Image: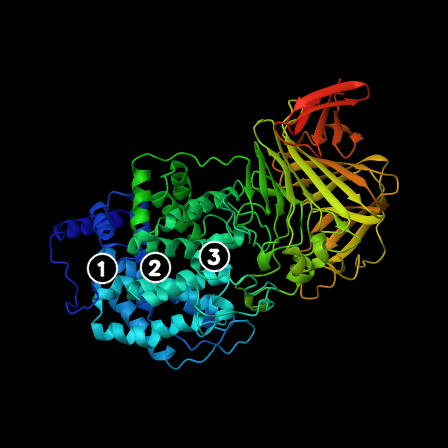
């Protein structure tokens, strides 16, 4: 550590002594009056960074880590292999590594003023130029839009977004002849291939095309090419795609004819900043959104890109951070890989840019400090100085309701938070081609640990042995299906019949969201199109009650249909079964629960008849106890299921669920509570408060207008929760008589003592 400190101090001395040296470009014959660097790093930013080196610990440490990383790469030598592999294969991984290395080496050249980094970037780019000018399409043919360096244009676009920054950093190091060679044989043909040669990839609203737009725009900014910049912002002029054509994931390529970077800001983001594909893909798309926006801000400030659509790009970062659990892991809504978090490099970019170009929210500094690194650019410097100056405050996550759709009218996602309990309620639109058929579903967390899980995606990203690291067939046959989620499946058929064309037309509607009362957080929404003739109305609450150790969940699912149906209602719990208040029968042979719509992937491990009135089930997970109490009818069936049937390649996790099945029901109500309580410590072998505090859960009223639920604890204290099913505005006044007792209130719901 002393050596690193001495090294940085020496750099500071050199830079301060060189501030007045002639900084004219290596090639004074440049015919481009645009300054370089200019798109991410700026000339003034470089001066400011050099002036502060050695005094900003998080920046200094980030710089030192990058220097060590790139010095090792330079020592190892340049590798530019002929492309041949899918994700996870050697050539794929090497070219991915190269785009990162090039960008970082370019930054080091600017900050450290050491020509070895510029030479390294130049030499590698020249090898790419030599290869690319004769390079055919990638030999792997799976993608709907094949790249050249990679099997899909998406990854080619990734490469160009990063490499554009490297080119900007060494632009003035190169001669005019060298720049012309690179632009003629590499950069312009590269930009053309991912755009005009691949309109099915580029000319759409999707995270893929966002990367493509940013790639073309970034290299256009560096080369001062207005045609490329225009193509990036507005799409390819005169191109009309087949509106019925679909991509590899089943989504429409360009149903509405919209395209370009600005359209990709307009359409997927709601006014609240929610991105319709979900947080996993928002995280992935945020890098090109923000890095290109930063470039536009620096080179074309007249566009006021960070003010576009009322500043939605910066709003979206706050939304994204709020869609993470207590540990910073993003909720796996739609196609989402578990474990992806705000420690990802894209979120370092998002946090730094949001702080620098936004309102300098001090809460972002605490996340940046947790990330323990910053960007080596103007925004990273701003964050480092903010931390140094003691401006940091905790990032406060509260209950939040995020609308979905361009105008905020296509449902949404609500996160209820009370102490350490987080409930994620999904009533959003279909979510483009990465959406799941899971209307009114939810997942539940305690201190960042899953209690009731959302499965997420069926994919092993960048692990070659599993389908080349790409989406597995089980993503469609299982992960997207309704039965894979914690919501109701009717007649063993997925919502919207599992058809994207139908699902993309509809969305649930919010009944109300209430978070003003710190002890009661509630969200309620309806879905009327998932099953024609059936209305689903779900109300979920987290309730803090002095008679309970921790806040508990109340879940009310009201179903109204024009015919009798079979309803399946699963609880995808994680952990070890402790106790059931029903007699469970184990079948002699494991058999799938069904033959399609996800049911073919569920083994039946246990069968039981439900108790009349209440059924209870408890489990232990990671040292904490949980209990489900649910209202049941005498003919209800209970099934213990486990994922994994018809999965010979073990592509699915072997996880369990308790499923409540109600047959021949027309209008019905599912009511449940989930309690988090107690703890178990293996070291002391001590179990504390391992039993439920709920004695009885009872439906005392259920009409079109109101539903009332009585929750009685083991001390015989009863609370009554009444929710308005129809007139649920905050201003609505209600008067209701139940069992000869009158209840009056104003608002969407009431929680009261029922003595």
Do tag 2 and tag 1 residues touch (Cβ < 8 Å)? no
Residue beneath label 1, please? 35
Quarter of the rendering containing residue 163:
bottom left
Is residue 97 among what the camera can see? Answer: no
The Cα atoms of the two marked residues, 3 and 1, are separated by 29 Å
Label 1: few (<14), some or many (≥20) within 10 Å? Answer: some
Q: Earlier in the sequence, mark 3 or mark 1?
A: 1
Q: Is residue 106 left or right of residue 506?
A: left
Q: Residue at x 58, y 26 (%)?
A: 517
Q: Could you say whether the residue bearing mark 3 is in a helix, strand or loop? A: helix
- The x and y percentages for residue 220 are 33, 65
Q: Secondary structure at mark 1?
A: loop
The reply to whether dot 3 and dot 1 touch (C-beta < 8 Å) is no
* Image-based side of 345 in relation to 707, left or right: left
Tell me the quarter of the image containing the C terminus. top right
N-term-proximal mark, 3 vs 2? 2
Q: Is residue 632 left or right of residue 685?
A: right
Please give the residue where the numbered disc 3 appears in the rendered image.
264
What residue is rendered at 30% in x and 74% in y?
182
SS at badge 2: helix
Of callouts 2 and 1, which one flags the residue occurring earlier in the amino acid sequence? Answer: 1
Q: CA distance from mark 3 to mark 2?
A: 34 Å
Residue at the limit of the structure toward the front, as seen here: 238
Question: Residue 69, labelled with which disc?
Answer: 2
- In the rendered structure, the answer to whether residue 262 lies left or right of residue 721 reads left
Q: Percent from the top left, x then y, of residue 116?
A: 23, 65
Q: Image point 59% across, 69% down: which residue? A: 245
């Amino acid at each position: 550590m002393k050596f690193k400190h001495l090294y940085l101090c020496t750099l500071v001395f050199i830079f301060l002594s060189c501030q007045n040296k002639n900084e004219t470009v290596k090639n004074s014959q440049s015919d481009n009056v645009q300054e370089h660097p200019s798109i991410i790093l700026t000339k003034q930013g470089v001066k400011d960074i050099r002036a502060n080196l050695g005094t900003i610990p998080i920046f200094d440490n980030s710089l030192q880590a990058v220097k060590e990383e790139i010095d090792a790469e330079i020592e190892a030598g340049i590798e530019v292999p002929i492309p041949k592999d899918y994700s996870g294969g050697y050539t794929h991984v090497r070219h991915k590594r190269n785009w990162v290395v090039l960008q970082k080496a370019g930054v080091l050249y600017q900050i450290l003023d050491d020509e070895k980094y510029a030479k390294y970037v130049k030499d590698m780019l020249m090898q790419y130029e030599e290869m690319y000018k004769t390079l055919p399409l990638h030999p792997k043919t799976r993608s709907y839009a094949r790249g050249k360096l990679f099997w899909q244009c998406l990854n080619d676009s990734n490469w160009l977004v990063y490499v554009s920054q490297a080119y900007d950093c060494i632009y003035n190091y190169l001669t005019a002849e060298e720049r012309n060679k690179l632009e003629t044989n590499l950069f312009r043909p590269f930009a053309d291939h991912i755009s005009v040669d691949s309109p099915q990839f580029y000319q759409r609203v999707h995270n893929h095309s966002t990367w493509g737009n940013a790639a073309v725009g970034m290299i256009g900014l560096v080369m001062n090419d207005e045609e490329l910049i225009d193509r990036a912002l507005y799409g390819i002029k005169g191109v009309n795609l087949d509106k019925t054509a679909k991509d590899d994931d089943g989504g429409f390529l360009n149903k509405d004819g919209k395209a370009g970077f600005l359209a990709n800001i307009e359409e997927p983001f709601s006014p609240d900043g929610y991105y319709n594909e979900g947080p996993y893909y928002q995280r992935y798309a945020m890098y090109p959104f923000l890095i290109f926006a930063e470039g536009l801000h620096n080179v074309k400030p007249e566009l006021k890109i960070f003010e576009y659509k009322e500043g939605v790009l910066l709003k979206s970062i706050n939304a994204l951070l709020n869609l993470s659990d207590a540990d910073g892991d993003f909720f796996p809504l739609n196609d989402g890989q578990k474990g992806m978090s705000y420690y990802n490099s894209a979120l370092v970019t998002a946090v730094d840019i949001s702080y620098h170009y936004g309102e300098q929210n001090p809460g972002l500094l605490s996340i940046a400090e947790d990330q323990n690194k910053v960007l080596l650019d103007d925004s990273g410097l701003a964050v480092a100085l903010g931390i140094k100056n003691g401006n940091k405050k905790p990032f406060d996550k509260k209950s939040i309701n995020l609308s979905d759709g361009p105008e905020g009218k296509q449902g949404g996602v609500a996160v209820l938070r009370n102490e350490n309990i987080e409930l994620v309620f999904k009533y959003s639109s279909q979510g483009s081609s990465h959406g799941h058929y899971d209307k009114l579903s939810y997942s539940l967390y305690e201190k960042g640990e899953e209690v009731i899980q959302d499965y997420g995606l069926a994919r092993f990203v960048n692990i070659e042995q599993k389908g080349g690291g790409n989406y597995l067939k089980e993503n469609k046959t299982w992960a997207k299906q309704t039965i894979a989620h914690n919501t109701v499946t009717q007649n063993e058929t997925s919502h919207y019949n599992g058809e994207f064309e139908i699902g993309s037309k509809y969305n649930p509607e919010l009944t109300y969201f209430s978070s003003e009362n710190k002890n009661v957080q509630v969200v309620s929404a309806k879905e009327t199109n998932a099953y024609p003739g059936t209305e689903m109305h779900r109300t979920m609450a987290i309730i803090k009650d002095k008679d309970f150790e921790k806040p508990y969940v109340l879940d009310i699912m009201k179903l109204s249909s024009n015919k009798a149906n079979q309803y399946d209602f699963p609880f995808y719990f994680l952990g070890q079964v402790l106790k059931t208040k029903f007699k469970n029968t184990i079948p002699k042979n494991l058999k799938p629960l069904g033959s399609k719509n996800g049911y073919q992937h569920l083994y039946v491990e246990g069968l039981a008849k439900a108790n009349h009135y209440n059924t209870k089930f408890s489990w232990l997970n990671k040292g904490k106890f949980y209990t489900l109490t649910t209202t049941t009818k005498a003919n209800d069936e209970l099934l213990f299921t486990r994922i994994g049937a018809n999965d010979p390649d073990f592509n699915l996790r072997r996880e369990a669920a308790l499923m409540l099945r109600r047959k021949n029901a027309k209008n019905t109500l599912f009511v449940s509570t989930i309690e988090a309580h107690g703890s178990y410590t293996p070291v002391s072998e001590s179990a504390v408060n391992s039993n439920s505090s709920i004695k009885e859960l009872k439906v005392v009223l259920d009409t079109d207008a109101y539903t009332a639920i009585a929750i009685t604890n083991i001390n015989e204290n009863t609370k009554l929760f009444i929710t308005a099913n129809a007139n649920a505005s905050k201003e609505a006044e209600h008067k209701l008589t139940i069992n000869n007792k009158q209840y009056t209130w104003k608002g969407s719901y009431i929680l009261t003592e029922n003595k």
